[in-house]
Amino acid sequence: MSQLVSAAAEGGLPTSLHAELRTLIASSRQRLAGAVNAELTRLYWAVGQRLATEVLGGERAQYGSQLLEQLGQQLSQEFGRGFEARNLRRMVKFAQAFPSAEIVSTLSTQLSWSHMAAIVALKNPQARQFYAQHAAQDRWSVRELTHQIERKAFERTELAALQAPPPVQVEPVEAPSLPALVFKDPYFLDFLGLRQGHDEADLEAAILRQLEAFILELGRGFAFVERQKRMVIDGEDFYLDLLFYHRRLRRLVAIELKLGRFKAAHKGQMELYLKWLDQHERQSGEEAPIGLILCAESSREQVELLQMHKDGITVAEYWTELPPKAELEQHLHQALLEARERLARRGVLLEGGEDE
């Protein structure tokens, strides 16, 4: 009180009071904006659900599109452009993509309508669930969500997860991440600006120069620990390229960089590193360390035959240049088809062995 009286007598207010009120007002506005957004998202879902049932279903389905146009004209005149026919169609897709009112209620407190509009535009139901989960869990902005969709985060995560059969299904929004869903394949390292003829040292140095971008590509939750981690085994020095820690998984993550094609010998090397880390670096309350081998070219059949997922090891390619969008989509689509076919063949063989 004496500080306030003194400051008033001097013709000014204390800095601490201004800062406190500023924080109070800003936080209140943020909560208000969040509440408004949540209510709007629930409203759009309710509108979409009613339209899907009353206009696009049953006897009216044949001329439902015309009814949507009429409703869009009427509602937009009363409530603004947000209720034009094209947005009403988006609301219908939203309700159809997320039919559970309980899930929508949870998502509405975590994601904006702009998030949901970007997610609903996706055709693959698993992709929609994946991006909704990660956008909420990792607090992606709309810009970051769009970036992840454009760079095919879902397809690359699925491709990496297929190394561990059976295919891992995307968990509900509330579920914690699993190791199999943390990695991607391939990783896009186009931001490193590497030239032809680079070696492993160049690759590692470029990653460290662009560490923030590299961590963004790895995904939320990774924290850098050390480069060239020294391990002394039988009096011999061994060096792990990069060591990270994943906060949500509570695990150390060892990363090895390989310029060429994956070789079976890389598995033994990573196993050695993981066992050393487990014995000497693992802290109380942490899970066992896991490993990521980044290669210029993967050997998918070798990786699957070696069943490296059982040892907590994932192999992924890294690309220093991105192909055109159509070529990228075709590559990932073909890679996923081939991975699923190999798993299906292996499943048939396993069933045959049990029958015998």
Image: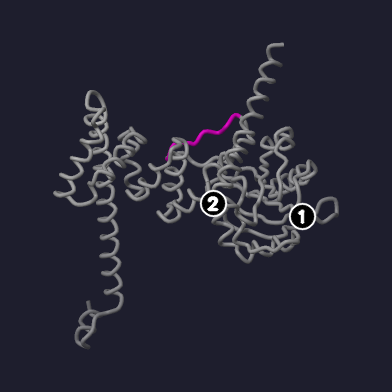
Tell me the CA gap for discs 2 and 1.
27 Å
Q: Which mark is residue 231?
A: 1
Task: Give the side of residue 325 with respect to residue 259, left or right.
Answer: left
* Residue type highlighted by circle 2: Gly
Judging from the image, what secondary structure is the residue with disc 2 in?
Answer: loop
Q: Which residue occupies 77% across, 54% down?
A: 231
Q: Which mark is residue 285?
A: none
The correct choice, above or below, for 112 with respect to 91 in the image is below
Question: For the residue marked with disc 1, what is the amino acid?
Answer: Met
Q: Which residue is mark 2?
A: 219
Which quarter of the image is occupied by the C terminus?
top right
Q: Which residues are magenta?
A: 166-173
Q: Secondary structure at mark 1?
A: strand
Main SS of the magenta part reads loop
Q: Position of residue 200 (x, y in %)?
A: 74, 59
Question: In the drawing, does residue 101 fall left or right of residue 215?
Answer: left
Rendered location of residue 236, percent (x, y): 85, 54
Residue 27 falls in which quadrant of the image? bottom left
Residues at circles 2 and 1 in contact by the CB criterion of under 8 Å: no
Dot 2 or dot 1: first in sequence order is 2
Q: Residues within 10 Å of mark 1 (few under 14, many from 20)?
A: some
Q: Is residue 143 left or right of residue 273?
A: left
Magenta span contains residue 172:
yes
The picture quadrant where one finds residue 180 is top right
Residue 37 rendering spot, x and y as whole percentages: 28, 50
